[in-house]
Amino acid sequence: MDLQLKNKVVIVTGGAKGIGEGIVNVLANEGAIPVIIGRKEADNLKVVESLKARGVESFQVQAELTDPAECEKAVNAVIAKFGRIEGLINNAGVNDGVGLEKGNYDDFVRSLHRNVTHYYLMAKFALPELKKSKGNIVNIGSKVAETGQGNTSAYAAANGGRNALTREWAVELLPYGIRVNAVIVAECWTPLYEAYIATMEDPEAKLKDIVKNIPLGHRMTTAEEIANMVIFLLSEASSHTTGQLIHVDGGYTHLDRVIE
């Protein structure tokens, strides 16, 4: 299927690792021009160089997304380079364990900046170009907003905010033909997830306990599977889809976990 993304300039925050890198690679496969925005330039450049070796045009901007000025600078750098933006994928964030018992006001607010405030800022600064191109926005979210997890108040609140912003923006941007959707992630195998599992007393047993509760295939979702849905929602193949929260999770969030 031709997703009509050839030469489209698409920003991916946190595009150097994990789900973000998966999204960047699928964009490259579709002939788009992925733009990685992330805090570690070395990580960004590593992906850019790997794409260059494949003959794929890409770009990167080093930016600390918790800083509003850095968000604006990053978007302006993309405009200066290409003169256009045709898609925004808000992906960067981290489950940082700021709960009621573990954490305080400053930790909570800092986590919101790490996990949802820059979603607003990136959309705000990219919007003039998205209006011109009738580009689309895809937000990456987590099942934590729906299921809870414990000891992660800030991340849960941020993801509830991501979901709410997805639907709010879908309404606000209707007059411009800009579609806004979200892909909700549950148990996806990434380097960050692998590091999390490694902190457990018995990592192998913990992983087995998790995957047995994933109904479809009793396995983790891959970054590529998340990316495939993201790119579909970004493309004109989903031209009448907006304001949707699409769960790519093997049924983890909504199906009965006692299913064998």
Image (cartoon, rainbow, N blue to C red):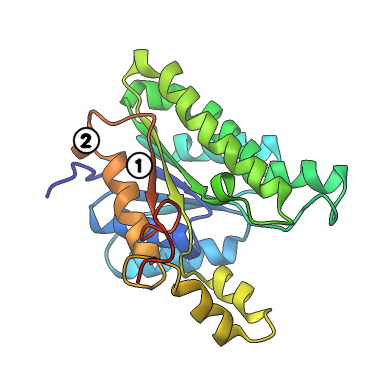
User: 233 or 2: nearer the eye?
Assistant: 233
Q: Quadrant of residue 10?
A: top left
> How far is mark 2 from mark 1, CA to CA?
15 Å
- What residue is drawn where x is 64% and y is 87%? 202
Query: In the shown orientation, is residue 170 left or right of residue 164?
Result: left
Give the mark nearer the N terminus: 2 vs 1: 1
Q: Residues within 10 Å of mark 2 (few under 14, many from 20)?
A: some
User: 2 or 64: nearer the eye?
Assistant: 2
Query: In the shown orientation, is residue 258 left or right of residue 3?
Result: right
Q: Relative to 243, say whether 202 is above or below.
A: below
Amino acid at the residue labelled 2: Glu
- What residue is drawn where x is 52% and y is 61%? 44
- What residue is drawn where x is 45% and y is 60%? 19
Q: Residues within 10 Å of mark 1 (few under 14, many from 20)?
A: many
Observer able to see residue 147: yes
- What residue is drawn where x is 63% and y is 72%? 196
- Which mark, residue 9? 1
Q: Quadrant of residue 47?
A: bottom left
Query: In the shown orientation, is residue 72 left or right of residue 25?
Result: right
Q: Position of residue 53 (x, y in %)?
A: 32, 70
Give the SS element for disc 1.
strand
Amino acid at the residue labelled 1: Val
Between label 2 and label 1, give the one nearer the viewer: 2
Q: Position of residue 197 (x, y in %)?
A: 60, 76
Give the SS element for disc 2.
helix
User: 146 or 83: nearer the eye?
Assistant: 146
User: 167 or 190: nearer the eye?
Assistant: 167
Q: Position of residue 166 (x, y in %)?
A: 47, 31
- Furthest-top residue in this view: 175
- Which mark, residue 236? 2
Q: Relative to 180, say whether 219 is above or below.
A: below
Q: Position of residue 52 (x, y in %)?
A: 34, 65
